[in-house]
Amino acid sequence: MTKQRCTWAGNNPYNIKYHDEEWGVPVHDDKKLFEFLLLDSFQAGLSWLTILKKRNNFRTAFDNFDYEKTARYDKAKIDELMQNRGIIRNKLKINAAITNAQAFLKIQKEFGSFDKYIWQFVNNKPVINSYKSWDEIPATSKESDAMSKDLKKRGFKFVGSTICYAFMQAAGMVNDHEITCFRYKELI
């Protein structure tokens, strides 16, 4: 019997693997949270599938999503990233990744971890939604609005409410699996 998945997963193997193994699973590891933040910011204006296909290239280019190293990137590293055909070569997004890594470190210092900071936007537990179809799922929420506003205030770039909501979905802060999807109940 075929497993019923969220509509967006379709038949693409990248989407299916990501959907079945990661999307909506609560993440509390700062390195993984930084990875999702970086990837979601690069995804702005593009499809998530584009990012998934380039994910390993991003991992290599950004030192395995090491936020401490990323925070120290200089002009030479930016130039290197701009020449890397395996990632999205957008100078604004590359600069934002560096700025965001620096702001990420400040949050860790203030809160003890980025995890402790970011999960406060959902009262430290996943929001369980009950959508029947992909068309019902919103692009933003009051939580993603608040997160976006606070991240921007702290100096983050490419963190509009839509990007924040996608981050929340990726990091399991919201369960937006369709109620008919096999992962919906698994993640409650």
Image: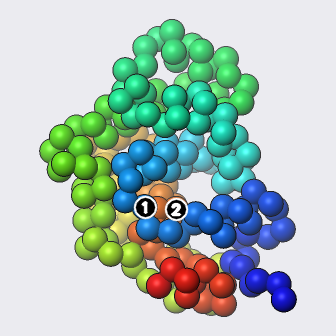
Q: Quadrant of the N terminus?
A: bottom right
Instruction: Please give the name of the residue rendered at 55% of the width and 88% of the height, measured from the top-left corner.
Output: 185
State the image coordinates of residue 148 (x, y, percent, origin top left).
35, 55
Mark 2 or 1 closer to N-term? 1
State the image coordinates of residue 69 (x, y, percent, origin top left).
40, 25
Of tags 2 and 1, the one toward the viewer is: 1
State the image coordinates of residue 118 (x, y, percent, origin top left).
30, 58
The residue tagged 1 is 27
Q: Tell me if label 2 and label 1 are in contact, CB under 8 Å.
A: yes
Q: Between marks 2 and 1, how big is the CA–CA gap?
A: 8 Å
The reply to whether residue 140 is visible in this rendering is no
What amino acid does circle 2 point to?
Ala
- Looking at the rendered structure, the number of numbered marks drawn on it comes to 2
What amino acid does circle 1 point to?
Val
Q: Where 147 falls versus 25 (above or below)?
A: above
Q: Where 97 falls versus 25 (above or below)?
A: above
Choose top left, top right, bottom left or bottom right for residue 131: bottom right
Q: Find the residue positioned furthest to the left.
A: 110
The residue tagged 2 is 170
Residue nearest the viewer, comparing 100 with 90: 100
